């Protein structure tokens, strides 16, 4: 600040302008006095001669607005610095103290206000332009970081260094959630801002990243409480309880559903895993869960990777799954109306925990119809849905049929 004061004295030739600059800096919460540039000289010149700023002088003010943004000075403080400087300079202007002519005072006031208007508007334009560039630069860096984190094959040391400015501790346990809109979003920034607001409020802004990838919204969030010397274990436990009160997927779905575009959303959440490579693993699980949810026509808005583990097992050995579906369920094709009604009844029966009345409610059928269809399954397949051993085989085959979209699609040749 002392160097800035010396430049002011050299440029202005009067200590009172330097005093005005320092006082304005204090009024603006310590905003650097250097951001004023030649602004006070422009005000003093306008008061004396009525001259408006030249284009080159306003361009210099615009550059000062950019410097303010790059230095992290808030827009409010930068504007307050300029307004306070104008107010204090007007109060101490020697011309006003010596003049008793109201016309001279009014002319000086008009000229000074014009400079204030031009300078503040130009300062704000430069600030906004710099902020847009910073946001675009940060968005690019964030997207590149997210891509490398989710890929999991980058240099660990480099990733740790790049993640630090975003507040990520790669030694913690994280989970990844993906949000898929029903159609392509025209403006993803609104969705990102909405998610950041609610997630930062719930989890804090450290160890959280919100970005886009391949048309999906990606949320990287901590799955364990961070405990530091300043954050005792009891407090960390409170934060963990608050964070898990509403699961991450449900939190995202509730917030995104408020947006006018993108509904209905579907959220897929990977399981928590520790370390850098755990992030990539959680992402792969979330992506696979989203793919399977679409393939299986799962209508739940939030699906977890842990909910679809059985499908992962079945899909890994497709020949065995095809053989299971054909051997166990193909006899249902001999029923009147085909296999589809009986298969839907089996699925509803298993989804309802083996309760026929609940299955009937879900299918909008009578309990008698459901029990009749279950009896037909037993007759045609030889497997009894009520028998624990047979039920396991039937349920696995039913899940396999859902994964293969059978009988709507023919079974693959194996």
Image: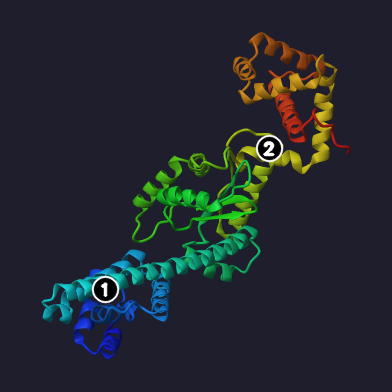
- Judge left or right: residue 136 versus residue 84: right
The quarter in which the N terminus is drawn is bottom left
The single residue placed furthest to the top in the displayed view is 368
Which residue: 62% across, 33% down? 299
Residue at x 41% of width, y 54% of height: 204
Q: Position of residue 360 (x, y in %)?
A: 63, 15
Q: Position of residue 184 (x, y in %)?
A: 63, 47
Position in image of residue 246 (x %, y %): 46, 40
Which element is circle 1 on?
Answer: helix
In the image, residue 27 above or below residue 4: above
Label 1 vs label 2: CA separation?
75 Å
- Residue 219 showing in the rendered view: no
**Is label 2 in a helix, a strand or a loop?**
helix
Task: Identify the residue shown where x is 56% and y is 51%.
Answer: 187
Locate the C terminus by quadrant: top right
Residue 33 visible somewhere in the drawing: yes
Residue 97 badge: none
Q: Nearer the viewer, residue 129 or 408?
A: 129
Question: What percent of the width, then of the height, locates residue 239?
Answer: 39, 49
Nearer to us in this view, 212 or 276: 212
**Tag 2: Cα neighbours inside 10 Å, few (<14), some, or many (≥20)?**
few
Mark 1 lies on residue: 112
Which disc, if any, is residue 310? 2
Q: Are marks 1 and 2 in contact (CB under 8 Å)?
A: no
């Amino acid at each position: 600040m002392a160097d800035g004061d010396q430049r002011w004295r050299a440029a202005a030739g009067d200590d009172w302008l330097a005093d005005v600059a320092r006082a304005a800096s204090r009024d603006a919460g310590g905003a650097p006095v250097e951001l004023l540039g030649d602004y006070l000289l422009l005000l003093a010149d306008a008061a004396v001669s009525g001259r408006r700023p030249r284009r080159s002088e306003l361009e210099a003010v615009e550059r000062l607005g950019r410097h303010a943004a790059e230095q992290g000075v808030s827009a409010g403080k930068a504007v307050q610095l300029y307004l306070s400087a104008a107010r204090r300079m007007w109060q101490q202007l020697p011309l006003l103290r010596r003049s008793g002519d109201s016309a001279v005072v009014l002319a000086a006031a008009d000229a000074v206000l014009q400079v204030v208007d031009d300078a503040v508007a130009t300062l704000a334009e430069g600030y906004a332009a710099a902020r847009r560039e910073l946001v675009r630069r940060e968005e690019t860096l964030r997207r590149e970081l997210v891509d490398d984190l989710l890929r999991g094959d980058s240099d660990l040391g480099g990733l740790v260094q790049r993640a630090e400015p975003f507040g990520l501790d790669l030694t913690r346990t994280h989970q990844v959630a993906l949000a898929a809109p029903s159609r392509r979003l025209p403006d993803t920034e609104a969705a990102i801002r909405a998610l950041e607001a609610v997630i930062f409020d719930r989890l804090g802004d450290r160890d959280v990243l919100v970005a886009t990838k391949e048309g999906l919204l990606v949320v990287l969030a901590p799955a364990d409480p961070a405990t530091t010397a300043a954050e005792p274990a009891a407090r960390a436990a409170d934060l963990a309880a608050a964070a898990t009160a509403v699961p991450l997927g449900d939190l995202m779905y509730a917030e995104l559903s408020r947006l006018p575009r993108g509904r209905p959303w579907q959220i897929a959440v990977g399981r928590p895993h520790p370390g850098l490579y755990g992030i990539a693993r959680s992402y792969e699980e979330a992506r696979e869960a989203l793919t399977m949810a679409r393939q299986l026509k799962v209508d739940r808005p939030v699906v977890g990777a842990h909910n679809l583990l059985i499908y992962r097992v079945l899909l890994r050995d497709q020949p065995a799954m095809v053989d299971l579906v054909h051997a166990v369920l193909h006899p249902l094709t001999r029923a009147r109306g085909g296999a589809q009604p009986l298969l839907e009844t089996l699925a509803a029966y298993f989804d309802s925990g083996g309760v026929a009345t609940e299955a009937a409610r879900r299918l909008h059928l009578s309990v008698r119809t459901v029990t009749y269809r279950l009896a037909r399954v037993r007759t045609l397949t030889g497997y009894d849905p009520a028998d624990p051993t047979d039920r396991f085989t039937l349920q696995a085959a039913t899940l396999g049929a859902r994964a293969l979209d059978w009988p709507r699609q023919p079974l693959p040749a194996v």
